[in-house]
Image (cartoon, rainbow, N blue to C red):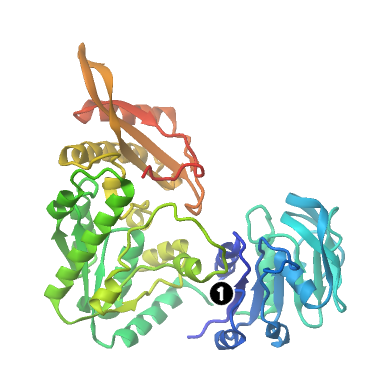
């Protein structure tokens, strides 16, 4: 089945992925591509309409990005957002200028006349602005459809050609009625059918996997996380036991995690999954290592080695399953400037060249929330669907300093108690990520009238929508008190518990 598609051209806005999410929430399939995408590729996608994102540039800068001129002659409806409006004005010889007053934050828009883009909106409504430049003079054929106190051309349109431009951001939650605007554009102006759903996706994905694999064997690393679990379920639905999953116990998993994943995926859901106990190998290579980047590389390289060995034992594998999501695809293709590497991420990318396997990525069209919805459609239980992220290097990067068996045992038990208390308090789904960290220090304490000199555990919990930024979670006092008391009383070797109240940025969510 071919879905009606909206094409989003990315000019570098931090909100570009939100536009795609909002459109998909309307039941309309969309794709995000860099603004420099070739006209031939646009024609191959055959969109019903185009959205131009915002961006941090001025249209007059020497290095400012511009879309191919051909898009204006394709007969498609186009919606320009913020920089996208300025790009539209620039393309048709309007005038853009630096605003006397930078407009950032909430603004009240006033509709100048009724039009289809603002259908079902009141005459005045709140919108989120984030711009310095603004349109000074509209091109010929355009008329104003909304204004603010600072922007007389806050929204404009060429009604004949179905070109619309808005200076504000309808995709962010700070524009409460923004979704109605996107709905009016995609459904009413572009005429899209809202047929994008997880049910239809499953049917199409299963058929695509069957055609792609052609009866061949697929191997994949399964961690028990949401992405790998849902990808494995979908693969199992499509090709049954032709899919061979491997759960590598690297020795730095949480308490009873390997056994729980096997019970859930192999025993309950029927996935062809093999447990590989490689803990001794990983811990041996981590001996004496304290640098977090070195820990990550050691674990990543050892994982590749173990996975390759197991796949060779199987023999005849032709495909490698990866749980790549759409944000990963966006990150690799979107229009963006240079960015610093904060820390490397554990993945199995190195397998492809070494193993000569063909890559299969059944989730590469989906956002995280869509993957969770897909998991529910495939029969996955809610505890698994809403499982919090767990890093590939596992507890190795939650033990500051050297990773030893004794320190792992302390952290495993402390972490299990902490998460147990969070679940009992009904807070697990409200928190983006929660975990314990073992610090590389000892502190003095008193237990049973005796002096102690033992380990310190830090507790971390954050609330976040995208994991790019995060605020520390205001954990209720009674939950913290119970968790701390239990850790100190039940985990031998700990006499002090602290709570991390730093946000991202400047801190990262993980400590290493």
Q: Is residue 208 above or below residue 394?
A: below
Image point (21%, 45%), residue name: 255
Q: Is residue 416 left or right of residue 142?
A: left
Image point (79%, 72%), residue name: 89
Most foreground residue, 49 or 285? 285
Residue 387 is situated, as x and y percent measured from the top left of the image, at 35, 53
Most foreground residue, 339 or 132? 339
The residue identified by callout 1 is 33
Residue 103 is situated, as x and y percent measured from the top left of the image, at 77, 52
Residue 268: tell me if it is visible. Answer: no
Residue 232 is situated, as x and y percent measured from the top left of the image, at 29, 69
Q: Is residue 383 above or below residue 242?
A: above
Q: Residue 183, located in which quarter of the rendered image?
A: bottom right
Residue 279 is situated, as x and y percent measured from the top left of the image, at 15, 53
Q: Residue furthest top?
A: 449
Q: Residue 39, located in which quarter of the rendered image?
A: bottom right
Most foreground residue, 63 or 73? 63
Image point (19%, 65%), residue name: 305
Most foreground residue, 181 or 459? 459
Q: Is residue 503 above or below residue 218?
A: above
Image point (62%, 62%), residue name: 13
Number of residues whose C-alpha sits closer than 10 Å to that of mark 1, classed few (under 14), some (14–19) or many (20 or more):
many
């Amino acid at each position: 089945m071919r879905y009606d598609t909206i094409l989003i051209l990315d000019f570098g806005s931090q909100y570009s992925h939100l536009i795609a999410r909002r459109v998909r929430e309307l039941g309309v399939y969309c794709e995000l591509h860099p603004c420099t995408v070739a006209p031939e590729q646009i024609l191959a996608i055959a969109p019903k309409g185009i959205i131009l994102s915002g961006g941090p540039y001025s249209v007059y800068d020497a290095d400012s990005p511009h879309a191919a001129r051909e898009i204006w002659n394709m007969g498609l409806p186009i919606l320009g957002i913020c920089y996208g409006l300025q790009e539209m004005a620039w393309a048709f010889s309007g005038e853009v200028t630096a605003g006397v007053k930078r407009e950032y934050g909430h603004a009240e828009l006033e509709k100048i006349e009724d039009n289809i883009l603002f259908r079902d909106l009141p005459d005045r409504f709140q919108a989120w602005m984030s711009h310095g430049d603004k349109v000074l003079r509209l091109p010929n054929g355009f008329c104003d459809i909304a204004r603010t106190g600072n922007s007389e051309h806050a929204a404009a349109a060429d009604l004949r050609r179905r070109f619309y431009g808005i200076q504000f951001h309808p995709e962010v939650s700070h524009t409460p009625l923004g979704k109605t605007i996107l709905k009016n554009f995609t459904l009413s102006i572009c005429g899209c059918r809202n047929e994008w759903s997880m049910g239809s996706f499953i049917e199409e994905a299963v058929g695509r996997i069957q055609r792609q694999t052609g009866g061949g064997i697929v191997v994949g690393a399964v961690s028990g996380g949401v992405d790998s679990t849902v990808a494995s379920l979908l693969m199992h639905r499509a090709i049954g036991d032709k899919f061979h999953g491997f759960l590598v116990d690297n020795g730095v998993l949480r308490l009873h995690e390997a056994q729980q994943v096997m019970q859930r995926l192999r025993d309950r859901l029927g996935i062809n999954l093999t447990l590989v106990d490689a803990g001794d190998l990983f811990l041996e290579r981590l001996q004496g290592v304290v640098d977090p980047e070195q820990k990550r590389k050691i674990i990543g390289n050892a994982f590749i080695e173990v996975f390759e060995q197991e796949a060779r034992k199987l023999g005849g594998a032709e495909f490698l399953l990866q749980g790549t999501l759409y944000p990963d695809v966006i990150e690799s293709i979107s229009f963006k400037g240079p960015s610093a590497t904060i820390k490397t991420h554990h993945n199995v990318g190195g397998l492809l060249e070494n193993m000569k396997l063909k890559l299969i990525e059944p989730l590469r069209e989906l956002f995280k929330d869509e993957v969770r919805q897909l998991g529910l459609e495939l029969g996955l239980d809610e505890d698994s669907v809403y499982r919090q992220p767990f890093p590939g290097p596992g507890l190795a990067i939650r033990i500051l300093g050297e990773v030893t068996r004794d320190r792992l045992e302390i952290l495993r038990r402390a972490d299990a108690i902490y998460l147990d208390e969070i679940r009992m308090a009904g807070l697990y789904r409200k928190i983006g990520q929660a975990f314990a960290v073992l610090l590389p220090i000892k502190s003095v304490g008193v237990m049973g009238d005796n002096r102690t000199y033992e380990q310190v555990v830090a507790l971390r919990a954050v609330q976040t929508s995208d994991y790019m930024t995060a605020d520390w979670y205001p954990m209720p006092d009674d939950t913290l008190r119970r968790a701390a008391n239990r850790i100190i009383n039940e985990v031998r070797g700990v006499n002090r518990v602290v709570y991390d109240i730093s946000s991202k940025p400047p801190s990262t969510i993980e400590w290493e």
